[in-house]
Each structure stands twice: as C-alpha cells, then as structure tokens.
Amino acid sequence: MLNALDAIKARRSVREFESTPIPMDVIRNLVETAGAAPSSKNTQPWRLYLLQGASLEALRTEYLAAFDAQIPAKAQYSYSPNPLPLVWTNRARDCGMGIFKHKGIGREDKEKRLAHDRANFEFFNAPQVFFLGTDQNAYSHGTIMDCGFVYDNLMIGLAAMGYGSCPQFSAVMYPEILKKHIAGSDDTLFIAGLPFGTPKAGSLVNGFQPPRLPIDEWFKVFG
Ligand SMILES: Cc1cc2nc3c(=O)[nH]c(=O)nc-3n(C[C@H](O)[C@H](O)[C@H](O)COP(=O)(O)O)c2cc1C
C-alpha cells in the first residue's frame, strides 16, 4: 500500500480496465475511509452510489443508446465557465490531443474520435462505477467542494491499493437516465462519475498523463 504522497503521485486517469471487479469488502473499507473527508460544519453533504454487475450493464446499455441516438447530453450543473479562459482552452486541447495520440487516433480520424467519445458513455467499460452526488435542492459551490474531497479520497485510495479510476463528468450527462437506474436518487444532483478497477495491462492510453505547471506559476509564498 502506497503512502498518501506516493498515492497522490501515482494516481492518473485510467481509461482501460480489466473486467474483474474489486471485492466488496475492499470497496466498503475504501468508501468508509473516503468518508473521513472534511466538510463545512461536518455537514457531509455527499451521496455515493456504486453500480456494478447487471445494474451497471443496464445503465451502460441505456447510456450508449442515448449517445448513439444523439440525444443531447446535459448535466445538472455547469462544470466550467463558458467560454474557458484562453490559457485553459489551450491546456484542454493539449490534453485531448495527448489522449488521442496515446490511442493512435489521428487529427482527421473522425470515426475513432467518435468512438473515443462513445467510450466515455460506456464508462470506459469499467467493471464498477461510483456516482457522486448531493441534494439537488440544497447545494452551493462549497457543497460541491465538500463532495470533491470524498471523490479525491476515493481516487487516491484506489491508487494507493494499485487500482485505477477516471474522474468523469461525462458520466453524469444523462441525469434522467441515472435517476431511472438508481433507486432513491430522484432529488440527487449528480456531480461526477468514477469508473474504477484494475488498470488494463499494457494499455497505452493509461500511460498518458498530461504535464503539470511548474509550481512557481501557481504557488506564491509571502513572508
Ligand atoms: C471532475 C472531472 C471530470 C472529468 N471528466 C472526464 C471525462 O468525462 N472524460 C475523460 O476522459 N476524462 C475526464 N477527466 C479527466 C481529466 O482529463 C484528467 O484528470 C486530467 O487530464 C489530468 O490527467 P490525470 O487525471 O491523468 O492526472 C475529468 C477530470 C475531473 C477532475
């Protein structure tokens, strides 16, 4: 098991998985640990749903059908400013190009690009997927930040144990379908999905990690 700093460094987005699920006792321990996250006034506003087995397959089938039918995908909240600041746009473009390059997808290869987009809507074929949410009638910016702490704990915990995951906004872009498949989630704001499992051996795309800024560009010390 990696220590916290090494696990943070080891985490990267995994977009190809082995089919074997992670045992339930390991998942329960992970979720319980992730729930140790701080939150404003200890409100613990998060909700976490795990889909696996037949439940996940049923959701996946309906997600793919919606994608193939070109049903507009729209999450329940806006993740980023629109338009993005130019410098962010450039980073996002470089990230997309890097993923395509590692998947052997050329600039003009529209078919493979579409297949890549589609893979998002099958949750990269992961054997298990977490869906993170909160109360859709009672949230603000900070609520989503609180939930994000649990989300990151899950990713880092998985990395510490040698597993992989991919944070995914696209996983919550058909909220009505999610609500249909997840009992009791009628009043949930779906924040993000997290496909997870064992990283596929020899996967090229899993080897991709976009570069980070030198810390002096975003870290300032005073005094
Ligand atoms: C909230 C969130 C949503 C994301 N959504 C997607 C997604 O829908 N599809 C995808 O392939 N990657 C998605 N990513 C992964 C980012 O592209 C990735 O974290 C970033 O490029 C940095 O790479 P790394 O995670 O490998 O360090 C998302 C990341 C975050 C934090």
Image: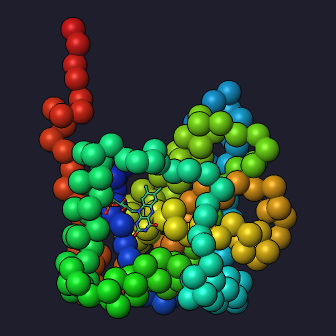
Q: In which quarter of the image is residue 12?
A: bottom left
> Is residue 180 among the parts visible in the rendering?
yes
Q: In which quarter of the image is residue 101?
A: bottom left
Compared to residue 213, the image places residue 178 above or below, namely: below
Relative side of 31 to 79, left or right: right
Residue 33, given in percent of the width and then of the height, sits at 57, 52
Residue 118, given in percent of the width and then of the height, sits at 47, 83
Which residue is nearer to you in this view: 73 or 1?
A: 73
Q: In which quadrant of this rendering is ligand 1 seen?
A: bottom left
Relative side of 45 to 74, left or right: right
The colour scheme used here is rainbow
Relative side of 22 to 107, left or right: right
Which quarter of the figure is the C terminus placed in? top left
Residue 195, given in percent of the width and then of the height, sits at 51, 72
Farthest-out residue, top: 223
Number of marks in the rendered image: 0
> Is residue 26 among the parts visible in the rendering?
no
Residue positioned 72% across, 74% down in the render = 177
Residue positioned 27% across, 46% down in the render = 86
Compared to residue 98, the image places residue 147 above or below, namely: above
Residue positioned 23% across, 70% down in the render = 97
Which residue is nearer to you in this view: 67 or 60?
A: 67
Compared to residue 209, the image places residue 104 above or below, namely: below
Residue 212, given in percent of the width and then of the height, sits at 21, 50
Which quarter of the figure is the N terminus placed in? bottom left
Residue positioned 76% across, 40% down in the render = 138
